[in-house]
Image (spheres, coloured by chain):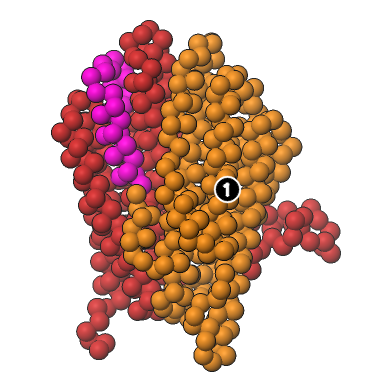
Amino acid sequence: MSPAASAEGGPLRQHFGAELEQLSIQVEMMGIVVDQNLERMLEVLRSGNLAVAAEAIAVDDRIDAMNVSLMERCHDLLRREAPVASDLRLIVSALRVIGEFERVGDLALRVVKLAPDFELLSRIPRAFDILQTMGEHAVERYRDALRAWSALDLELANRVATEPPAGIAVSQLIESLLAYDGEDAVVVALRTMVAGQALDRIADHAAVLGARIRYLITGDPDHLAAEVR
Amino acid sequence: MAEQRKSFHSELDEIRDEIVQLGALVSEFIPRGTEVLLTNDMKGALALIEADDQLDALTLRIEEQCYNVLALQQPMASDLRSIVTAVWLTGELERSGDLMVNVAKAARRIYGATLDPKLKGLIERMSEEASRLVKLSLDAYVERNASLGAAIDDIDDALDAIHGDYIEAIFESHATHDLGLQAAVQLALVGRYYERIGDHAVNIGQRVQYMVTGWLPEQTGAARLKARASFELPADLDPPGGDADAT
């Protein structure tokens, strides 16, 4: 991402421009670490692998540390530089984006922590299959949002922001759960819905990221309005 | 010039008042949406769906106001946290409102379905609990009460427990053929919406804690990482996967 226009001018403004560029790259780094944990989440969802689950739980602490550190950095820049226009938009957007990344990481962890219940999650083949599809869809949308941030790609951001939510998949998931009449039907349904809900929300957060990045690129208040759905 | 500008603190107060107004709108949405669902009130459903525009407009106004304050003033640490918290809270409240709009839409989709008294009772309890959580989270915000903000996570356990009973009741009702498949699916989704309102209230509580004390829930994870890096690894090695800190 290019540093803000205010990098033009004296050495102090150039230094500020470099700091903004560094900030946007570090936000992207945080996004990549979250992406890696999403990959672990998909693996846990496919196999129930407990070792991968443990690894993901440990990595989440790193995501938390990045969030805290980047938030402090943003606050410091706001206090120190009193930014305006596109610089202010970048810093405020970075704050929103890292918050969304952190939430996506937490939701991934919610799925990962179901690893000991893998047997329950895979009890109903159709529900299991829908969960896999929902997981892949959510991660794909998140990755598009991350790419839109890295490249400041308006078209991609727009696509992520406006793609219809996967509500149908959640309905299908519930239908498949209701069709099962085993003794453990309720406990299977509750665990599966926790996973389904988390995956659905990851996709929602990706859409919010898309809307936020679109606003960052254009500065158009109508695009800010699009985040409020 | 300086006289013409509103004082910084009066702008902060204005933002707080508007957040409270937004919260009041959301608090009103919860019983309204529940009533629509339980009484098959299609007129009420439409009114609620349309009222969401008001909520969205207020959300945007508050967010823009926060950006203006950031651009025109130079807030110091705790004031800055208040503004950043306000931006976060608008998002949490706006999404809670959207969830009640989803309840109204679900009511339209199951129009004519008969809900047994047990299901109705559980929906009422989830609604009351969600309302209580939103109210408590707003109280924590207005009173700048970090302890109350922190407690909301545990208070939310009650809603999660009712949600579990509710899913069980849907299964029972569906198994005895009292409740059709589509209605059962919509009702299961409705349960999720209440549960998510509770999650948003928990998030608000955590943001209030941050506003008052500067503490973020993520700091616990960050501290764990630091401890692991100090105690488990030789001092001359980096933590696995690189630097722990993004800065």
For the question of whether residue B162 can be seen, the reply is no
Question: Badge 1 local density, few (<14 within 10 Å), some, or many (20+)?
Answer: many
Report the front residue among A178 and B125. A178
Q: Colour of chain A?
A: orange
Helix or strand or loop: what does disc 1 sit on?
Answer: helix
Picture layout, residue B6 above or below residue B42: below
Q: Nearer the viewer, residue B11 or A44?
A: A44
Residue B246, by quadrant, is bottom right
Q: Tell me which amino acid carries mark 1.
A: Gly
- Horizontal arrangement in the rendering, residue B116 relative to residue A119 (left or right): left
Residue at image location 34% in from the left, 49% down from the top:
A229
Q: Chain of mark 1?
A: A
> Is B185 part of what is drawn in magenta?
no
Q: Identify which residue, B84 or B150, lies in the foreground.
A: B84
**Residue lying at 18% horizontally and 29% vertically, measured from the top left:** B41
Q: Residue furthest front?
A: A155
Chain displayed in red: B
- Side of A180 where A63 appears, left or right: right
Picture quarter with the N terminus of chain A: bottom right
Q: Residue at label 1? A: A105
- The residue sitting at 18% across, 30% down in the picture is B42
Query: Which portion, as a residue range, is magenta?
Result: B95-124
Q: Quadrant of residue B44?
A: top left
Tell me where residue A88 appears, x and y as whole percent.
44, 73
Q: Where does residue B18 sit, x and y in percent of width and height?
A: 25, 60
The answer to whether A151 is drawn above or below residue B48 in the figure is: below
